[in-house]
Amino acid sequence: MKVLLLDVYIKDSKYRICKDTNGSYGTANDYGDSLFPKLLTKIAKNTNFWPPIYLMYVGAVLREKGHEVHYSNNIVNDEEYDCVIMSSSIVCHESEIKEIKKINKKSKVIVVGSFVTSNPEKYLETGVKVVLGEPEFYFLRNSLDKILKDNNFSFNSINKENEDLDSLPIPCWDLVINRLSFSGGLKKKKCIPILGERGCPYSCFNYCTYPLAQGRTPRARSTEKIVEELKYWNKNFQVNEFVFRDPVFSIDRGRTENLAKAIIDEGLDIKFTIETHLNNLDYELVMLLKKAGVFIIRVGIESVNYDVIADAKRFSLKKEKEKEKLDMIHSIGIKVIGMYILGYETDTKESCLATIKYAKELNTYIAVFSVFTPYPGTPIFMKFKDRITSKNYEDFNQWKLVFDHANMSGKEIRGLLDYAFTTYYLSIRWIIKNLRLAL
């Protein structure tokens, strides 16, 4: 069959959208409304793009089964394809529904991803089929022809048979190889996402979307399979930069050490970005990761306020220990991206300003400030359900206040974003320490 991987985005969006992040609910990068945040927004849009990793796994599975697979962000002539497999997200939800309505034969459209898994209703109303859970495993176990001929509209792929990540082929990034990019600075660089592990057991599942699709039990690919994939892209496509999409890269120390040592032993000349929790890092491990090629580590700092963190049910280090760990990482020569959240339920303007001030004290290579967003499907959403003020899912992009906040308005939150990004990146301390690293 001729299959289209349909990956729809908001038309003419002024900000970068990634449908792979945030547990594949997706995020945007709309940093603010004043001049400098708008400049940062434009840089992010021009230097970062990759489709959802699960969609490229689906394409690889189907290609292995003999299907002809294509990728597009819109559909011109649906009669050209026997099947359309569409990614789902919250950040492009209304745009996805609009695109579905353009397709004449809805029964050949299959919508996949974590957002449709948690919120299938609007998609099903259009007459399409949906796969709930991890779609790549469903297509691995079932024939595409059988699904299309089935009179059912909903198919379940939420089960324990999804544990063997090694059974999946290498994702079909070659379909978009010239568009892939991830930047830890101002330059656009070709970069390929890598899956090492799925699942996260941490307490922030209360508001985090990753466990909705991946579960809370970590499942890892073997070291051999990961190294095999790194070598494949490095040798066949001359890609030497990668971003690991594990929710918490170093959650299993032994596995992390084995992978780093295997990369070193293979003599791979690569660089890669990871995301993890500071509690999982110490000097010996960070030195090993540096030797293996880690050059950027993303960590969630979230807030300087212990009460706010406790109310969000997030585990966080004491601030003194946090600073100590970050200083250690910087001393080894690895860049740090610190991620902060403004507008938690108990936040005030003053507590947000304190978090921004703390971020400037830490002075990491990059600081990303986003707005707390209660996502449908997460445990915490029920607490906010009757306070949601936004009528469109596409507003749930981590840069707008979508609920009635007791202490701040949406306009005040946007003002805090303006202030955070402008004062952070135009501070003399940041310019002296970090600007040269971004060039």
Image (cartoon, rainbow, N blue to C red):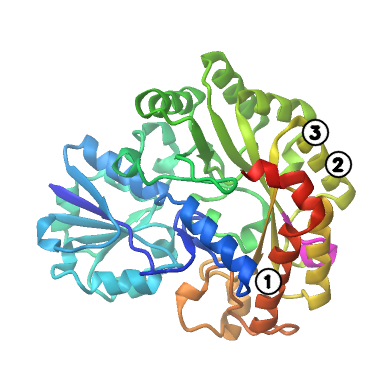
Which image quarter is the C terminus in? top right
- The CA span between labels 1 and 2 is 29 Å
Q: Position of residue 376 (x, y in %)?
A: 51, 71
- Between the C-alphas of marks 3 and 1, the distance is 30 Å
Q: Position of residue 286 (x, y in %)?
A: 72, 30
Figure quadrant of residue 100: bottom left
Residue closer to the observer: 114 or 432: 432
What type is the residue that disc 1 sits on? Asp
Which numbered dot is residue 418?
A: 1
| Other residues around mark 1 within 10 Å, as few (<14) / some (14–19) / many (≥20) | many
The magenta region covers: 301-309
Badge 2 marks a residue whose secondary structure is helix
Give percent across and percent down for residue 191. Answer: 47, 39
Residue 248, labelled with which disc? none
Q: Residue farthest to the right?
A: 320
Task: Residue at 38%, 69% (x, y): give it.
Answer: 12
Does the residue at mark 3 contact the one at mark 2 (Cβ under 8 Å)? no
- Residue 91 among magenta residues: no
Relative image position of residue 51 (x, y in whole percent): 39, 51
Residue nearer the viewer, 431 or 22: 431
Q: Amino acid at mark 3?
A: Ser
Mark 3 element type? helix
Residue at 82% over, 61% down: 304
Closer mark to the observer between disc 1 and disc 2: 1
Label 3 belongs to which residue?
331
Instruction: Residue at 58%, 68% (x, y): give it.
Output: 38
- The residue lying at 41 percent from left, 45 percent from top is 180
Can you tell which mark lies on residue 324? 2
